[in-house]
Image (cartoon, helix red, strand yellow):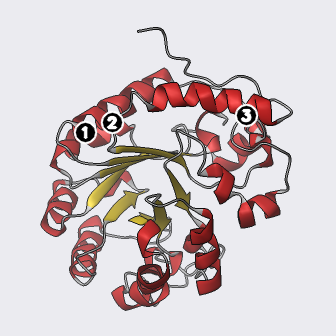
Amino acid sequence: MGQIPLFPPAPGEDDAALASTYADARVIRDQLPDDIFFGTSSWSFPGWKGLVYSRERSQTALAREGLREYAQHPLLRTVGIDRTYYAPITVDELRAYADQLPAGFRCCIKAPASVTGMVMGPGAGSAPNPTFLSADRLIKDLLLPFALFFQSHTGPFILEFPPFPRSWRVDPKDFLSRLDTFLAQLPRELDYAIELRDERLLTPQYRDILQRHGVAHTFNYWSAMPMPAAQAELIRPEDLPFAIVRLLLRPGTWYEDQRELYRPFNKIVHVDESMREQVTAICDRVLTTGRKVWVLVNNKAEGS
């Protein structure tokens, strides 16, 4: 078999250039297992003209209507809906998203910070969040609307837990005990994955909680977390009901710095071969069990 082109051609100016990009992507897609779903953390980036989009559009326009073209890309079989982390989404907005997606296209949805954040929003200091780990709030604000109006496009729900405030002395065992109780209250028919941002929580107790509730782990590539392979030493990918990989930020780097370095996100800037090898190994371990793996990539991981 001939060598597969791993990178698309440079961004073009017209539909013909994008058609060439898609043709190269189909060669790769035809050789991938059906149970792996590649996508991006979000989709509203004008710099993707010639890579994902055929013409120049504003970030606002892409956020509103870009999903239709995004979902035509042969390699993009999922997408992260991360705006739900910041505020509830309306029924009309859910219907607008659904109208743009083909049958069988499922999204990965971020749980709201109102449930996963220990403090109330950014800059709120030490004010405690009264709905932290509230199953009722999660069901009302997120799970129920998606079940009613977005069911055919709903994939896993990602519960990202930001780092604990430095001024708070949080006992990881106490947090994990609360997480255990919280997960027991969620509807069983939906898929959930936990994403940790504090490596102190990567413990056998955490692993046992995932197994008890049939919940997945998110192997993240992020500033202050161990590399994905190190996470997989404790949380065995083949033991999970499915797995999510989120490629966000090279460990030791920070969001604002990478955003300024990589804009407009139209090319790979820094390749991390070690990360790629680790992600491939995790995917292999999941796929050999006949389970699904979702891989979401952020522009700040390598540049595009």
Q: Which residue position is annotated with label 2?
A: 33
Percent position of residue 272, x then y = 52, 25
Between the residue at mark 2 and the residue at mark 3, the CA separation in whole angstroms equals: 24 Å
Q: Which residue is mark 1?
A: 287
Q: Earlier in the sequence, mark 1 or mark 2?
A: 2
Q: Position of residue 200 (x, y in %)?
A: 32, 55
Mark 1 vs mark 2: give the one in front: 2
For disc 3, the marked residue is 18
Quarter holding the C terminus?
Answer: top right
Can the viewer see residue 158?
Answer: no
Residue contact between numbered discs 2 and 3, judged by CB atoms under 8 Å: no
Q: Amino acid at mark 2?
A: Pro
Which residue is depicted at the point 73% across and 39% down? 265
Q: Secondary structure at mark 3?
A: helix
| Residue at mark 1 to residue at mark 2: CA–CA distance | 8 Å
The three-letter code of the residue at mark 3 reads: Leu
Residue at coordinates 29% horizontally, 48% vertically from top-left?
A: 292
Quadrant for the N terminus, please: top left
Residue 3 at least partly seen: yes
Residue 229 versus residue 286: which sits nearer the camera?
286
Mark 2 secondary-structure assignment: loop
The residue sitting at 74% across, 50% down in the picture is 45
Q: Are marks 1 and 2 in contact (CB under 8 Å)?
A: yes
Name the N-terminal-most of marks 1 and 3. 3
Give the vertical position of 162 relative to 181 (above or below): above
Frontmost of labels 1 and 3 is 3
